[in-house]
Amino acid sequence: MHWLNRRGRCLAALATVALSLPLLPATVSQAAIAAPEPTTSAPYALVPQPVSQEAVKGKGFTLTAQTRITVLSKDAAAMGVGTYLARQLAPATGYSYRVATAPRAITRTVVLDPNGPEGLGAEGYTLVSGEEGVVVRAHGAEGLFRGVQTLRQLLPAAVESPTRQAGPWTVAPVRISDSPRYPYRGAMLDVARRFYPVEQVKRFIDQAATYKINTLHLHLTDDQGWRIAIDEIPSLTQVGASTQSGFTGGQGWYYSAADYKEIIAHAKSRFITVVPEIDGPGHTMAALASVPELNCDDKAKPPYSGFEVGISLYCLEDERHTANMSRFLSTVIKAVAELTPGPYIHLGGDETPQATSDQYAAYVKAATSETTAREKTVMGWHQLGQASIPSGSIMQFWGEEDDRESIGTAEETESIRFVRNGVAQGARFVMSPSDHAYLDMKYDVSTPYGLSWSGYVPVRRSYEWDPETSTAKPDGTGSIVPAQQIAGVEAALWADRAYEGSNALPTPATRWPEPSAYTDYMSFPRLPALAEVGWTPRSARDWKSFRQRLAQHGPRWTAAGIDYHPAPGVPWPGTVTVVEGPHSVETEGKALDNPGGSTRAGTALVMWAPNRGSNQTWTFTRQSDGLHTMTNKTSGMCADAGDGSGPVGTAVVQRPCTGEIGQRWKVTPLDDGEYTIASAASGFVLTAASATDGAKVTQQVDTGAALQRWSLE
């Protein structure tokens, strides 16, 4: 779960029948179908944003009961993509789409062509839609599958419904060329702390695939549960699977070999690779409760259902117990490797405060040796960098702002030192910075689930970061991981605090949602944001564009039954913007700050790096006249502009709340989701002097400058 030392802390087709399709009298080439000329940049709400897209002249292609899906190959995997598409479209449209092979493209059909140039890569594709049909072209089935996800987004939102809806079903006219920035784009489910039944895992796979996620990381073992059956050690599931965070006495809270194979097969059909994680040498209480000889006294620990971290460690204090650990890992890793066709096994490696360097090295040596012996690539959290690891291993970095701030100083954090060691050993990196990519972090103070030890993570924060600077200084310079060693990104959803009122430990009255309900709320809309970080070129990403596109996915999620969180800052259709409650008030990467959490009246407000702390939390309260007061959470005082008699440039301070005119602010939403905040007394707008720490905050004439436009996170 990663908060011990932080604030607070292969391709297979879907089953299909290849139907012979008699050639229609009129057959055309792809070029003929693509005849419409481009007009302007396409305004379509596509997520992730394609590398290149252009709107084309003319009407789009409308699906009817006679529409066929034509696959220009007899390859089973490519035919499987066609069957997948037919099954996705059928419920909402009410049409039964015929999927058939043909030697060349046919007009008035949806054409899937896996014979594109090698230069498209495994996942690249082109898509052309016009009145005469749609052609998705790729170099193989995987690229076709990614293109089909874009095709779905070019149809009306109601196409995602599981029941029949009114049409028409017109594919917007467009020409797209697309490929991913990174080869690894992952999402992690913590099934150890909160068990997810097989069907809920498959549901999440389908959701992730929609946004071109290609890796599912399953956190299968932790203190609170062991979720994968190992035939040679049945006690791991008889005992170790009997608990979850907050639950005891369970049965069936694990995946049998058949269950796991079902998950693997479903993921494979969505071109998603499964990465199993067997955590160690810490996060091992479930193993210690199941296998006595892993403990120094050779006695099993009680099964654990609590919420602490850093509380467990394999016994590594002598040769006999170290050998016990090695034999245990050999059995487990062999079994998991045989069940898992993907190339990776994740070995954990984080949060082991009790381990000496020699003990930690012994675990890493045993675990990595077994993994490479099974011809799997070693993967682990960035703490693996403190030990010797095989070149080409993948380290998953989950550090945050404190780590970035320490880079280049005499006080670099352990995390940064471990990353440097990993780089030197030839490791590649998957970036999962906790203050951007951890989906269990609260959106804001009102979020009912999760924690905030890495700060609040609103949608914009999930979107506005880059893998190349996630191990750089705060100004983006001095990155310690070379760009060529970055494999990709991963969104991580931990589940130990998957209940309402998660700031406190649960009680008998605590309400626990279904795991899938928790996942919907915490992942949407942030998972699509992180998917775009991993897919779209950095130069093509822009928050203002993204928030507009993302908003149009709300109706898609509703149609699909995804109970998403309509997070502030996104213009969701049908919603009215009402500014109320606690917010971080930010502009140009800095936040409105009560310096040092002062409780002194008259303290001048400043700008500072966002920390999502109480001194940067402002509660907006709407008054009867439509104006707002802004109250600082630390001091309980209000932002005050004075009585309006002062000149342009008068400082904004905090004073005890009196309701006077100087403490009333007109908050005006702008088209891009930002706001101006104007004093009711002076008429001048809240303005930051600069985007540097400590910059003054004053009142100025509204010029439309960037430092006068605020986001309320």
Image (cartoon, rainbow, N blue to C red):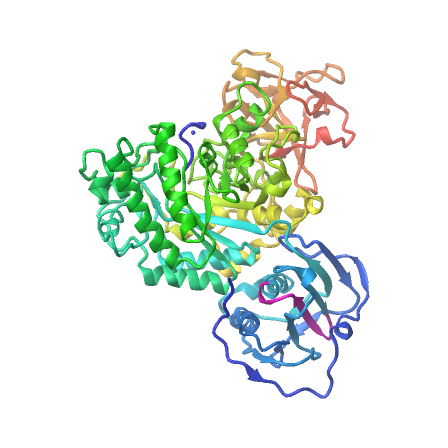
From the viewer's side, name the closer residue of 322 and 96: 322
**Any part of residue 366 in sight:** yes
Does residue 465 lie above or below 377 as drawn? above
Does residue 205 lie above or below 89 as drawn? above
Q: Is residue 134 magenta?
A: yes
The answer to which image quadrant residue 461 occupies is top right
Q: Is residue 651 magenta?
A: no
At horizontal 71% and vertical 79% (from top left) the residue drawn is 107
The answer to which image quadrant residue 69 occupies is bottom right
**Any part of residue 218 in sight:** no
From the viewer's side, name the closer residue of 615 and 211: 211
At horizontal 73% and vertical 31% (from top left) the residue drawn is 706
In the rendered image, the quadrant that contains the C terminus is: top right
From the viewer's side, name the closer residue of 278 and 318: 318
The magenta segment: 130-142
Does residue 60 lie above or below 400 as drawn? below
Specify whether 277 is left or right of 647: left
Does residue 695 lie above or below 89 as drawn? above
Specify whether 105 is left or right of 517: right
Specify whether 338 is left or right of 660: left
The answer to which image quadrant residue 200 occupies is bottom left
Percent x, y for residue 288? 25, 40
Percent x, y for residue 475? 65, 28
Number of residue marks: 0
In the rendered image, the quadrant that contains the N terminus is: top left
Percent x, y for residue 674? 66, 37
Percent x, y for residue 38? 80, 62
